Image (cartoon, rainbow, N blue to C red):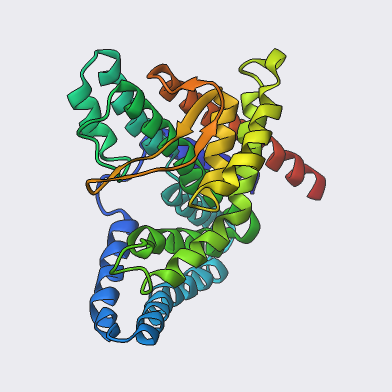
Amino acid sequence: MWIIISVSLIVDQILGEPRRFHPLVGLGRWIKTVEKRLYPLNRQLPKILIAGFLGWLLVVTPILMAAIWLDCLVEGFWHGLLAIFTLYLAIGRKSLIEHARRVYQPLLKGDLDAARQQVAMLVSRDVDRLDASDISRATCESVLENGSDALFAAIFWFAVAGIPGVVLYRVINTLDAMWGYRNERYLYFGRVAARADDAMNWLPARLTALSYALAGWHWQASNNTCGTAMQCWWKQGRSWKSPNAGPVMAAGAGALGIQLGGGGIYHGQHIESPLLGVGRPAAPPDIERACTLIWKALLIWLTALFIIAWIWS
């Protein structure tokens, strides 16, 4: 297990995300097809909930069955290759870091327009009026939150349930990304997708928050930033709109000694959010620090997984 995870991370570091023929593109098309067929059942509230549940099942069930079948069919060396390939497709560490640095580089040059264009690919808020601090805050939030979703949760579910586990997680996470919105169209139709994603991310998110706190201790050990990060997680994380993103971002902000949250403009309307973390507002160098925090947290995960594998061997 530890070797497969390590090799998958190395492959991701070398190749990054596939630029063509990524399975998630095909999954997205299948999800849109299912939605197109079932959403017309939304004329009454119970039918919206039923349609969303049926749609969720139609997407998840055949893919999970295929993953279980392949996991049982392939053995030996080829099973190891299949596991490496599957986990590689499920994680996105290099892509996340590259996107963050595409925001960071223009900020260093004072090119706010280019930085706004890049951060718009990471966040859903309106970016036209963001200054350098706002852009840095939005990017750090995205790095910390997606570090949990795109990296640590995938590793967790692979470690727990192998190929079927990581495939199930990635399908559910993609469904949430497409249906899990609290707007008029998806408030009920996407409720099952959102709740399923919350359930699968609950434990990985808290392990990620813990690893952020431990990794952040190395920034300024004399100031006990690990304890500060844990306090931010406990006191602030629960007030965030997402039950999993809140603890992750609060712990990460506390570890970095910066403040995140505070709201933003979404679709022309200002939506206030609780403050996360402590200290000064985010600045452009904090984007690079957040990326480094992800790397240190990953080393903690790999060390823990190695110890677990050694004890069980």
Task: Establish if 268 lies above or below 302.
Answer: below
Is residue 309 shown left or right of residue 110? Answer: right
Corner quadrant of residue 301: top right
Residue 275 at least partly seen: yes
Q: Is residue 216 above or below residue 166?
A: above
Residue at (33, 61) in percent of width and height: 178
At a point 32% along the width and 28% down the height, the residue shown is 135
Residue 64: x and y, percent?
48, 71
Q: Quadrant of residue 28?
A: bottom left
* Closer to the camera in the image, 29 or 200: 200
Residue 45 vs residue 10: left or right?
Answer: left
When asked about the image quadrant of residue 129, the answer is top left
Tell me: residue 300, above or below residue 39: above
Res. 300 in view? no
**Where's residue 1, x and y in %?**
64, 49
In the drawing, does residue 95 fall left or right of residue 260?
A: left
Residue extending farthest to the right is 311
| Relative image position of residue 223 (x, y in whole percent) | 68, 16
